[in-house]
Amino acid sequence: MTKWVYGFGGGGAQGSADMRDLLGGKGSNLAEMSSLGLPVPPGFTITTEVCTHYSETGGTYPDGLEAEVEQALARVEEIAGARFGDPQRPLLLSVRSGARASMPGMMDTVLNLGLNAETVKGLAAMSGDERFASDSYRRFIQMYGDVVLGVAHYHFEDLLEDHKLDRGVALDTELDADDWRFLVGAYLKKAEEILGQPFPGNPKEQLWGGIAAVFRSWDNKRAITYRNLHAIPDDWGTAVNVQAMVFGNMGDDSATGVCFTRNPSTGENAYYGEFLVNAQGEDVVAGIRTPQSLTIAEREASHTDLPALQEVMPDTYAELLEVRRMMEGHYKDMQDMEFTVQQGKLWMLQTRTGKRTTNAALKIAVDMVDEGLIGTDEAIRRVDPAQLDQLLHPSLDPDAERKVLGRGLPASPGAASGRVVFNAEDAEGLAQKGEDVVLVRVETSPEDIGGMHVSKGILTTRGGMTSHAAVVARGMGVPCVAGAGEFRVDYGEKIMEVAGTVVREGDVITVDGATGEVMLGEVPTIHPELTGDFVKLMGWADEVRTLGVRANAETPADAETARKFGAEGIGLSRTEHMFFEPQRIVHMREMILAAGEEERRAALDKLLPYQRQDFVELFTIMTGLPVTIRLLDPPLNEFIPQSEEGLAEVAAAAGIDISTARARAALLKEGNPMLGHRGCRLGITFPEIYEMQARAIFEAASEVAKGGEKVVPEVMIPLIVTREEFDILKDVVERVAAEVKEASGTRVEYLVGTMIELPRAVLLASDIAKTAQFFSFGTNDLTQTTYGLSRDDTAHIVEIYRDKGLFKRDPFASLDTEGVGELVRIGVERGRATRPDLKLGICGEHGGDPASVHFCQKVGLDYVSCSPYRVPIARLAAAQAALGVKAETNA
Amino acid sequence: MTKWVYGFGGGGAQGSADMRDLLGGKGSNLAEMSSLGLPVPPGFTITTEVCTHYSETGGTYPDGLEAEVEQALARVEEIAGARFGDPQRPLLLSVRSGARASMPGMMDTVLNLGLNAETVKGLAAMSGDERFASDSYRRFIQMYGDVVLGVAHYHFEDLLEDHKLDRGVALDTELDADDWRFLVGAYLKKAEEILGQPFPGNPKEQLWGGIAAVFRSWDNKRAITYRNLHAIPDDWGTAVNVQAMVFGNMGDDSATGVCFTRNPSTGENAYYGEFLVNAQGEDVVAGIRTPQSLTIAEREASHTDLPALQEVMPDTYAELLEVRRMMEGHYKDMQDMEFTVQQGKLWMLQTRTGKRTTNAALKIAVDMVDEGLIGTDEAIRRVDPAQLDQLLHPSLDPDAERKVLGRGLPASPGAASGRVVFNAEDAEGLAQKGEDVVLVRVETSPEDIGGMHVSKGILTTRGGMTSHAAVVARGMGVPCVAGAGEFRVDYGEKIMEVAGTVVREGDVITVDGATGEVMLGEVPTIHPELTGDFVKLMGWADEVRTLGVRANAETPADAETARKFGAEGIGLSRTEHMFFEPQRIVHMREMILAAGEEERRAALDKLLPYQRQDFVELFTIMTGLPVTIRLLDPPLNEFIPQSEEGLAEVAAAAGIDISTARARAALLKEGNPMLGHRGCRLGITFPEIYEMQARAIFEAASEVAKGGEKVVPEVMIPLIVTREEFDILKDVVERVAAEVKEASGTRVEYLVGTMIELPRAVLLASDIAKTAQFFSFGTNDLTQTTYGLSRDDTAHIVEIYRDKGLFKRDPFASLDTEGVGELVRIGVERGRATRPDLKLGICGEHGGDPASVHFCQKVGLDYVSCSPYRVPIARLAAAQAALGVKAETNA
């Protein structure tokens, strides 16, 4: 028979910390603390399975639950020496939620259950404090009314305010026992008036009402939203913890507080916490009174006169010190605990693993290794890779004031301020004058690269997490907020407008690419430093991981950043990004608008020296490491000038008239360029393009190799759907390589491989692997075609789908393991069936997403490649994956 | 040990007709005829495996070949009673190609091998005709020089012309033996001059030269092109047939001719053929002399005075009659034979299954069943389903003159003439005046539907076989040439221009949608009739096939055509096509530009009655049969008016100002609409749209059901990628169905299923099948995403890929079995794993392609659905698939 209820307290427990799935975080830790002999008020936990039953059956309980609750309650009464509903010695109960994953404040709680007209007298007698008893009763009526019965709390607050006006007082503390008694009556009357029936006085009825309310709150709107945001499954459910009340507000020998076994902000190995004398937990949260420090050291550090717990309750403090020692020794991690002192007696109400800043996480993990508490593997597990982002980018000063104008997608982390400009040219102009600029565009195109480079931040009103702006900004490490749909940009007027505020060119705004917020004016930022702990931990991570980590980079600056962050090569160098500098773009456009092969070759000849120089720089920076170079990929129309002037310039350079240029440009227009004339199709139709690129690669490689450096080029052919097209283009590359070798006399080892970025390439992988020497899964494009979703157009759809729970996570940000991942798995299997030593990597945006890195490890890839700033994240995630840490994925 | 050479002649053979793969068509039939005791000149066949060896090794022969050739040659010499190279009784040989599949005229042939200065004298003595001998010798020098040695034939022709000028004669026949002897000398001298060495006189050297030339010709350009066009694999290779020469030009008791055992044009069961007295085969082909009929009946029918073979060589004719009897009895199919009479003796040189018109194919197949020669299964196998197209559409009179302007893709079969118009409105206007029009557009959009309906033919300059124009035209049965890229259309001037010719509005052109040709002026067409033979054969086909055949149709006219052609229901009714009629489009646009749900519902309410009426008509026509209705699928921006007037009209109807309308329209614009906000994403974001459509379906269904008709609606939700989105929309449909049932009191059975048209739906098929009641594979879209190719943009790329042999066939026209087909296979497997009785169909354009139908049978689909005019093709192809006929596929 299924057990639905687990008791704890009195120095023992039926549950334990490893029953988190069944008892929730709070319940399992209460059981654990109780078993350890810590002073935990007795209680019991109703399991998450009951919640699931309750949800699925539309609000009924499983058979046997009621009897188990009765039994558990009897045990609580026995331990507490009080009886629920007893007019003389009434037991009061709290009813709290407690899910498997922490969802702070998202669900409901009811305190002081068991109070009614009779038991309130018993409470007064037991505590010797009538005012306290009546105050507790009115608190209970308000809380229970609001949470269980749906009587909005303002009804009660209005009554309290009216009474204070009548009495001519300002503060609750000025009210006496009679006032509270009067208000209890008024509250009960108001509740009856609204409900049309009396407020429930029966303690058992109150208890079951409270339990049901907690279960119901699992499906309230904010809990659902929180779960969607944190990828918590709806079917986990919450447990309910019913526990004897203890009171921190029973006089000056009572108190309530929270404490962390180490400093959660800095990671320092010192007790850290705060408390209030004669108060309940909600008073600490409410922030009306200023809490006092736990320790004298803490008090001195915060320059306050309020005495520390160490001073006012030295015995309790000594007891808490012992609790700290036991808890860290037992849990081997920093704990965040709640305690209450009732008339001098310490009660522990909760413990959980404490949240901490990234710096604290690093320091605690490394310190605990030094202290011998944990090993290096455990230290690696302790730091959330995604959190490392904070360390690598400036962030907003949390204490600074900010006026949020609106928000978009957190597309590239970091925060920055600058003057608003509305096009790339203005960005470059203003930046040259030494101004910080934020580039605001509806969406960006490759033409904007120059302007993006000089901007401190980027804001777009359209596009998703893998839109052009987002991908490029992440690559450059420039903070970016993308797809901020509520902003309206008017290029003509050079203004943008959001919720009635108009921002003009030259106005200063701040973008926070970590949260997606856009603020008016300059908000101060904090520039974090990479600590020794970071270096130490990353060193341990590198020792255990088996997955290689490369970077997506094409500029020397990006390549240097990548190497600094520990990239083991370049996994994707997008050659098209090299064609947008002003002196090159005209030749590029000449090439695109050429009438035939001859004209095209003439333009390509002009591009060759630039491209060669790019590769010389890349190979020099990445000496000894592999550099994967993708041949030209995007639809040619991306290079078409948008303006008449641009067109005129190209026409002049190419020696054709503008109407011819316009006509040729029109021919390049496609209804769905993402599914058009791009990738290796360019190489098939215009082999001379790939020929030039291959020449640039091998000439650069021999030049650098001649200088004694080791060069490892890996030439990657994009958008393959048949082996035959790969073979044709591989021949082009090999022929050029042989010619260059012949001419230069230098032998350079190289590989020719392909991106696997279309479903057909996956399905034909065993054939393609016959000649391709490596595969790199291009999961951005693969996600687009697998879902039939364009990353540039469908940010709003992805958003709607996430809100509705149709997508667990944005599939462009975190690999869809069931669909796209299934294709990757098939591709790996089929590719390796033909060529067991096939080198396999991934170079989509997913390479820097921890969950996706775990998936890559699972399917047996050799490396991931991601934007330079995500390299440390990928290194740590890969180490965790190697250690078998379970990661949340999209599946 | 592999046998490389197979001898035949003298009443026996080492090979037989079933060794076609090894001996080629010609070789295997020569062996068969020889075994049957027919008079076949002795010879031998070198196998196709030798050709493969020759190609793969760059021109070498396998060990043992030379000895086998020597041996076979000795046997030929023995049977012929002559020796190769013998000056007295020289054996002369022909060397001909002969591949597994017929490739007429694509490869090389050398005749009269063995002639030199010595043997020519022997030939003169044997034939008693010096002129004949020298003429044969000079023909040999020219042919061998051209084919084997690479001396272009014009060199020889120039010498002949010069000599005729010198001699003052006009015709070859006026030259005598001395002239030919003189020319032989001149030819030999010229060849030596060009080659730098003497023309080879050694017969053995000549023989091996000839064999090598035939093998080489397998890889000549026109042979490769032919193979690409006819999907013949490059590795099949050709056999070489070496055979003793016989001469039809040895005097008036000699002749040469061809005969068909039945009339290849009408199928009539009567001998049919033609011949020339004293001539070689090449003279018949050259067409200089008018051939004579085989039979008296034929002579009379063609009103000619030239006597028939039956009259001039009655004994030979009698022999040929016996040959005909034997051949039809043996092959059980109409044969196309070549014969030569040498000095009164009949020789059979070749037989093969005769090509025939579709009408002849039907008649012969049905007649042969009646004659007891074959069974009905064999009759079904005999007719090529693709050929049926001819019967269903008018075709150009083959005898009519035509001036071809240019060509595009044969996008919708049939031929039609009419006045050129450049937009749908003009088409409707001119058609109303009773004029035949041909609509010419760069590409069509749903806005053009009205104009397309009234046009006799359609021509577009952009788009592929599954572009909008092509798909819609095929559905309507309107001839269409698509993607004719060489045509330049100028809408402003209302002209189009191609290769220097300007065609103006109102000019008459003719389009042939079967060939892709566009002609100036009106070319007469032939309107074929569906014969009784057609009906009989289709009846047999329906009895054997197991695959259902439905039609893609939405208009009543299309649905009626479909039912007439034997469709067993509608597999795809595209509801969006119903929204383009003038009175509806404004409401549709109001709906699209609505600011919110309320406005949208108001517009939908106006559309409901139209949509309901559409379904009433469809259900009535298709009574008793399933009707699959796809809910709204295309991106909404397809409905946005292109013109300012259109926008103004909608703004007025919706009660908003035009700038608001323009702004809302701009918001709908997408960079890649094919991957955008479409399909079920519309249903998720605007459930009220699908709600209205479901209401229209079920209200129509109960209305028709009330009239006593059986209605079988199958509601299809497009573009699904997760089961969850399907479930949400299935709920909408079921809720509306229940409401309508409640209101009408009529119970209608229905299914709710989905299109599987994105790779992710395939991968998740086992999950989706939990709730989807049927799958219909949308292989058009699936091909787009699997290949990453837009069907509207990439016609020219598909063309280039086909030319280069990268695509065997256009994957939009014939299912790519390796890639897209693999996905279909996975989808079937996963779907049926969850729901074994899952109903499975295909509704892409591939449903009407015979090879694709075979694939659908193989993977176990329940039905195919195709455009109404392709229903008979699908029925026949399905029957053949059920019979296990092997079809060419893309794999």
Image (cartoon, coloured by chain):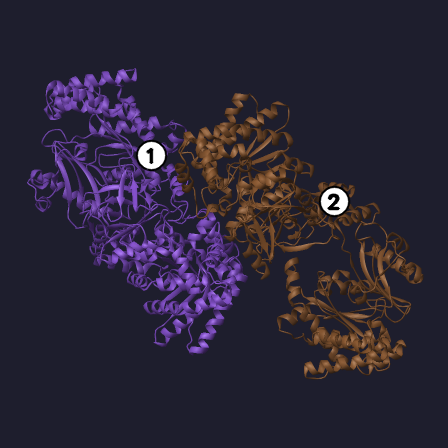
Chain colours: A brown, B purple
Front tag of 2 and 1: 2
In this picture, residue A382 sits left or right of residue B288: right
| Labels in figure, total | 2
Q: Chain of mark 2?
A: A
Q: Give the image location of residue A781, x and y in percent.
A: 53, 46
Q: Give the image location of residue A541, x and y in percent.
A: 72, 43
Numbered tag placed on residue B47 in the rendering: 1
Q: Secondary structure at mark 1?
A: loop
Numbered tag placed on residue A528 in the rendering: 2
Which residue type does callout 2 highlight? Answer: Pro
Q: Nearer the viewer, residue A210 or B9?
A: A210
Which residue type does callout 1 highlight? Answer: Thr
Q: CA distance from mark 2 to mark 1?
A: 78 Å
The residue lying at 62 percent from left, 73 percent from top is A57
Q: Chain of mark 1?
A: B
Q: Give the image location of residue B629, x and y in percent.
A: 41, 64
Relative to residue A436, is residue A605 depicted above or below?
above
Q: Give the image location of residue B130, x and y in percent.
A: 13, 21
Q: Nearer the viewer, residue B585 or B277?
A: B585
In which image quadrant can residue B98 be found? top left
Relative to residue B530, is residue B293 depicted above or below?
above
Quick one: quadrant of the C terminus of chain A? bottom right
Q: Nearer the viewer, residue B479 or B390?
A: B479
Q: Secondary structure at mark 2?
A: loop
Q: Is residue A839 visible?
A: no
Asked if both marks, 2 and 1, belong to the same chain, the answer given is: no
Q: Is residue B551 visible?
A: yes
In this picture, residue B223 sits left or right of residue A396: left
In which image quadrant can residue B616 be found? bottom left
Quick one: quadrant of the N terminus of chain A? bottom right
Q: Residues within 10 Å of mark 2 (few under 14, many from 20)?
A: few
Q: Residues within 10 Å of mark 1 (few under 14, many from 20)?
A: many
